[in-house]
Amino acid sequence: MQSLEKFQKSTREWLQANCPESMRTAMVAEEVVWGGRNASFKNPDSKLWLERMAARGWTCPTWPAEYGGGGLNKEEAIILNQELRRINARVALTSFGISMLGPVLLESGSVDQIMEHIPKIVAGEIRWCQGYSEPGSGSDLASLSTRAELHGDTYTINGSKVWTSYADQADWIFCLVRTDFDVPKHAGISFILFDMASPGISTKPIQLISGGSPFCETFFDDVKVPERNLVGRLNEGWSIAKRLLQHERTMISSFGLSSGQSDRGGTTSMLASIERAAMHYRGDTDRLSDAVLRDRIAQFKIDSAAFAYTSQRSIEESKQGQGPNATSSMLKNYGCELNKRRYELLMQALGSQGLGWEGDGFDSDELQVTRQWLRSKANSIEGGTSEIQLNIIAKRVLGLPDIMSAGKAQGSK
């Protein structure tokens, strides 16, 4: 107990001395730090905060210290998170390397792969994107057809991916490719890493109804990738892919937490509080005097608190070695619905001020609410649709029979 008290004291002192004042404010979307070879920092304090946190390994506090992580145990990580929340510290680094690739690389990667990539993820030196979905392989991901053929010690990759988040800004990609077309579809998939600067790679942003373009089409034309970049065994990438999806769904579920996260971590003062949005309303009526709206806000806050505790419990279980499981589908499904509810309430609280797209009659916070309301609709699609999550919950949590398998068995009698 004494050692934890000392750790808490030293952590509090370090944060007080090293966290810049501007990093103790609500995050704004344009200041989210993604890192990478071409990272830019609108706020110089963001770069300083990243460097200081990465130097201690606290961008990935529980990852092994020998790979650049913080090496903290469960109790120490809880204390660190508490102290960061106490001063309202911003997340120093937002990274698909942290939330998705890193955990599976630590589980399935070779020592050389771990030593090459994990320290760079911790330091924010490489920005990653995910190459999973294809134009003809969305919910049925295992039907993917991007081909990787081995010639000597080099793979040649041809095909395309779609909905590749920030592919036009990423440095490397973790990608599913088909390495065997003559076996059942799940059995011929491999998991491979490669540099997005490789010849033959091109990207095309996809503009969303919200006006943003976080997703891209990504094309591979005779892309050469060293064989050593294959993670795990040849043709056994589906197991790694499923494991990574569990981590991704846990990450996406965090959109539902009451901190007001918008697209991949950005917030504004408006999004921090539905009550504030209601008080911000410019009409003649006090929006908070609406009993129905107050009831909906209260219920949302209760549900958000319950979800936050459940999410924290899941995190604690993962730190005990259990890792993400079918629970991630439950969290993803509920968190996404909760996030959509938040934006519905924000729109209701703002009234007509939540309907603007452009013009002097609306301020930047109001316009962002409108766009994020539209963007939130994709939460139930990305990372596996809500229908997919419900199927997983039905089979792996509730133990219900697989209707498709049961139907085939019945038909064979």
Image (tube, rainbow, N blue to C red):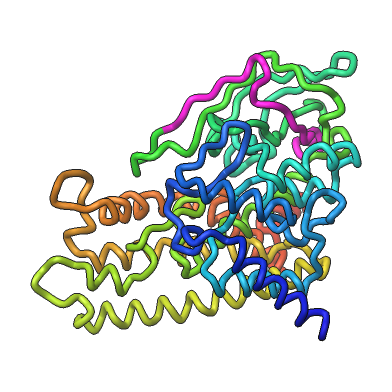
Q: How many marks?
A: 0
Above or below: residue 379 compared with residue 193: below
Identify whether 327 is placed above or below 93: below
Residue drawn at 43 percent across, 78 percent down: 301
Residue 172 in the figure: left or right of residue 211: right
**Residue 253 x, y percent position in the rendering:** 56, 61
Judging depth in this view, the residue of 169 and 354 nearest the camera is 169
Please name the residue shown 60% across and 37% down the image.
133
Image quadrant where residue 210 sits: top left
Outermost residue toward the left?
284
Q: Tell me: 18 left or right of 240.
A: left
Q: Magenta includes 266?
A: no
Report the span colored magenta.
184-206
Residue at 77% across, 32% down: 192
Quarter of the view holding residue 340: bottom left
Question: What residue is rendered at 47% in x and 67% in y?
Answer: 259
Q: Position of residue 229 (x, y in %)?
A: 82, 30
Question: Of 248 and 385, which appears nearest the observer?
Answer: 248
Which residue extends farthest front?
A: 17
Residue 270 in the figure: left or right of residue 28: left
Q: Nearer the viewer, residue 12 or 228?
A: 12
Compared to 124, does 288 lie above or below? below
Is the N terminus in the top left, top right, bottom left or bottom right quadrant? bottom right
Can residue 132 be seen here? The reply is: no
What x and y, as percent, mark residue 349? 25, 69
Nearest the viewer among 157 and 11 is: 11
From the top left corner, tell me how far across and down residue 255 is, in percent: 51, 60
In the rendered image, is residue 169 in sight? Answer: yes
